[in-house]
Amino acid sequence: MRQQIYKIWNQVRDYSHLANVGEIARRYFAMNAFDGALTMIGVLMGNYTAGVDSPRIVVSTGLATSVAMGISGLWGAYLTEAAERKREIAEISEQVLVDLNDTRIGKASRFAVAIVAIVDGLSPALAALLILLPFLFANLFSQIQWVYFASLGMALASLFGLGTFLGYISRENIFLYGLRTVVAGIISIVISYLLGAPGE
């Protein structure tokens, strides 16, 4: 059993190296987690400005949005990445005059498609679910508006964490990167509020 697990692990590492999965997965994770956080900010602000005071409604709306983002990311990434990888394998096969579909390169390519699709689908959904956490414990708050504030605070904290991750990858100032992503969140909050605020 241990040898089988070790063999699978080595195969995964081999495929990851051949298909450059790590770099691509990081890029997809960052992009889509960012999208998920900003989308959830929009959902929260839409509920807040509409005067929704039921945590259950906010959670159900947020979950539906999370599922939709997850399916969209998974399906879209799979189809897009599969098309790109197939084209790449076909071009290389033509150059070397050998069918590469059943070789290590072909298998690594299919492995990359699966991993990228999973990362693309899970990252926005997980970011959205993290932001919804305060609404699952709404009974701990005295007023619903504090739940909204806590959730928006969670969204900004998530964006800051994502920014520091990007800063780490780029080997630049992680604090400045964190601030940049937080600014995007604040702009989204302000614009969403202005669009949804009732007129005088």
Image: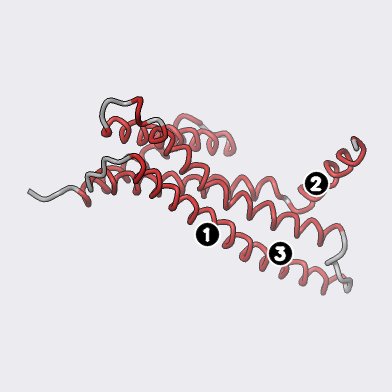
Residue 105 location, quadrant: bottom right
Image coordinates for residue 83, horizontal then vertical, percent? 66, 68
Are the residues flagged by discs 2 and 3 in contact, CB closer than 8 Å? no
Element carrying mark 2: helix
Disc number at residue 159?
none
Q: Name the residue under label 2.
A: 12
Q: Can you give x and y, in whole percent of width and height, for residue 96 in the image?
A: 87, 70
Name the foreground residue: 143 vs 89. 143
Asked if residue 19 is positioned above or below residue 181 in the image, the reply reads: below
The amino acid pointed to by label 2 is: Val
Q: Which residue is drawn at 26% across and 44% down?
A: 52
Mark 1 vs mark 3: which is more N-terminal? 1
Residue wearing tag 3: 85
Which amino acid type corresponds to the residue marked 3 in the rendered image?
Arg
Determine which of the numbered discs, if any, sits on residue 72 in the image.
1
Residue 33 appears at what percent x and percent y? Answer: 51, 45
Q: Which of 158 and 175 is in front in this view?
A: 158
The total number of labels drawn is: 3
The residue at the far left in this view is 200
Q: Of the residues tagged 2 and 1, which is closer to the observer?
A: 1
Distance from label 1 to label 3 (Cα)? Answer: 19 Å
Earlier along the polypeptide chain: callout 2 or callout 1?
2
In the image, is residue 190 above or below residue 77? above
Identify the residue at image location x=21%, y=48%.
Answer: 194
In the visual, does 90 lie left or right of 182?
right
User: Would residue 149 be seen by someone viewing this image from the given angle?
Assistant: yes
